[in-house]
């Protein structure tokens, strides 16, 4: 393994080394059964145990109450942008959307195809550099749900609180900060996240959904889009992503060994502080995109004095073993993604590089 590369990619992102080592160890023969996890039936006893372990892992780590179902679906977080309105927003009904970045905008676009949408707060006019306070949010009384993105991966802005819908069911896209800190699952009716940042590999989407939402799914929904059917079949209405779910079970085990999500939060705060402090200490050479209260612990976004310098920064960083720092193509700049598995030494290596570059 080339352990000199620090992978700052926004996703698919770095996985914990012990997880990859365990997967390598078991690649040809899972738990002594003589076959790979990718070669066994999803209806087999060994796979049933893996699915149960992944589910229990998520339930324990996030203290998911018993009246929520945990699903491992396909189609990415992007399919959830459609499944949510297809299941919960009728043509004459309204859903609230809080738009703090590019992913929220994409979710809104899909919801508009199904019913009425009300953008109750947006930071678009400020280039998505902040998030609202709870007090700034006014929900539509009859809204079927309110959707928000707890961490906008592209702009690097993060909610520091679990949004309270004041009676309106809350739907949260937590793709890029799930498992990075404790959350109060009870505040949300549905939480979803593509796995490829903090949970496992791409190709699995975690959905945590409250029982009463499952009960609200309209009759005659297309089977693969029907949360009720998917829940009744324990994520196995069709062949699930067995390899992805296996890796999720290993990531959960690793997180437990690390002390769970509270311990991760402390580490994540420390790592992010190292980067933000260096940005703030650069006398304006580096400028952070997000306003301070909304600074993401997962995706640190910043600019240099010119695009040419940003290009040079990325090229030289890659040569120095710091990979994946180019900002998203839609906003440019630099983005350092420092998810749970990202080592502190990689953060200090980047700060050393910063100092030498400016
Ligand atoms: C916050 C957020 N939502 C949604 C998505 C889309 O996820 P997927 O590629 O799994 O559809 C991403 C991907 O990076 C994301 O960061």
Image (tube, rainbow, N blue to C red):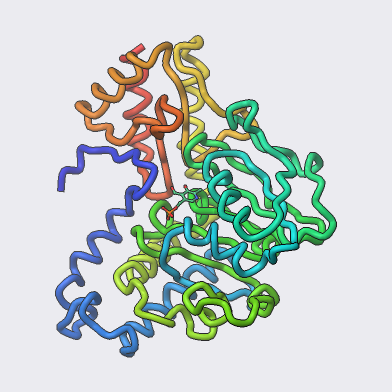
Q: Is residue 181 left or right of residue 6?
A: right
Q: Nearer the viewer, residue 327 or 357?
A: 327
Image location (x, y in percent) of residue 253:
40, 66
In the rendered image, the vertical position of residue 318 relative to residue 298, given as above or below: above
Answer whether residue 259 is visible to the viewer in this image.
no
Residue at (20, 43) in percent of width and height: 3
Q: Nearer the viewer, residue 209 or 266?
A: 209
Image location (x, y in percent) of residue 277:
50, 24
Residue 170's image quarter? bottom right
Residue at (38, 33) in percent of width and height: 347
Q: State the quadrant of the C terminus.
A: top left
Answer whether residue 154 is visible to the viewer in this image.
yes
Image location (x, y in percent) of residue 222:
51, 76
Q: Nearer the viewer, residue 259 or 320?
A: 320
In the rendered image, the vertical position of residue 42 relative to residue 164, given as above or below: below
Residue at (37, 44) in percent of width and height: 342
Q: Nearer the viewer, residue 273 or 58?
A: 58
Image location (x, y in percent) of residue 261:
52, 56
Residue 296's image quarter? top right
Residue at (59, 32) in percent of width and height: 128
Q: Is residue 76 left or right of residue 188?
A: left
In the rendered image, the vertical position of residue 331 relative to residue 264, given as above or below: above
Q: How many marks?
A: 0
In the rendered image, the vertical position of residue 59 relative to residue 302, given as above or below: below
């Amino acid at each position: 393994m080339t352990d000199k590369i620090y992978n700052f990619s926004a996703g698919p992102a770095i996985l914990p080394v012990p997880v990859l080592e365990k997967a390598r160890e078991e690649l040809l023969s899972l738990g002594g059964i003589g076959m790979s996890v990718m070669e066994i039936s999803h209806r087999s006893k060994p796979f049933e145990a893996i699915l149960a372990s992944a589910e229990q892992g998520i339930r324990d780590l996030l203290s998911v109450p018993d009246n929520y179902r945990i699903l491992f679906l396909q189609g990415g977080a992007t399919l959830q942008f459609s499944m949510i309105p297809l299941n919960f927003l009728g043509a004459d009904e309204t859903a609230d959307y809080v738009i703090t970045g590019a992913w929220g905008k994409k979710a809104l676009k899909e919801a508009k195809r199904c019913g009425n949408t009300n953008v109750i707060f947006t930071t678009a006019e400020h280039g998505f550099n902040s998030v609202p306070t709870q007090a700034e949010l006014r929900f539509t009384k009859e809204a079927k749900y309110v959707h928000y993105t707890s961490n906008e991966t592209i702009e690097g802005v993060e909610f520091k609180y679990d949004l309270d819908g004041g009676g309106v069911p809350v739907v949260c896209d937590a793709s890029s900060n799930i498992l990075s800190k404790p959350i109060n699952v009870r505040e949300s009716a549905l939480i979803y996240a593509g796995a490829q940042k903090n949970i496992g590999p791409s190709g699995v989407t975690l959905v945590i959904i409250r029982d009463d939402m499952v009960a609200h799914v309209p009759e005659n929904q297309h089977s693969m889009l029907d949360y009720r059917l998917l829940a009744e079949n324990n994520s196995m209405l069709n062949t699930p992503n067995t390899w992805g779910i296996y890796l999720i079970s290993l990531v959960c085990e690793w997180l437990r060994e690390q002390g769970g999500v509270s311990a991760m939060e402390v580490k994540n705060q420390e790592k992010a502080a190292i980067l933000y402090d260096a940005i703030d200490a650069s006398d304006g050479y580096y400028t952070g995109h997000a306003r301070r209260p909304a600074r993401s612990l997962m995706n640190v976004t910043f600019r240099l004095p010119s695009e040419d310098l940003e290009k040079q920064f990325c090229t030289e960083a890659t040569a120095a073993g710091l990979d994946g720092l180019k900002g998203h193509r839609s906003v440019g700049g630099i983005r350092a993604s420092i998810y749970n598995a990202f080592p502190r030494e990689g953060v200090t290596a980047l700060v050393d590089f910063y100092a030498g570059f400016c």
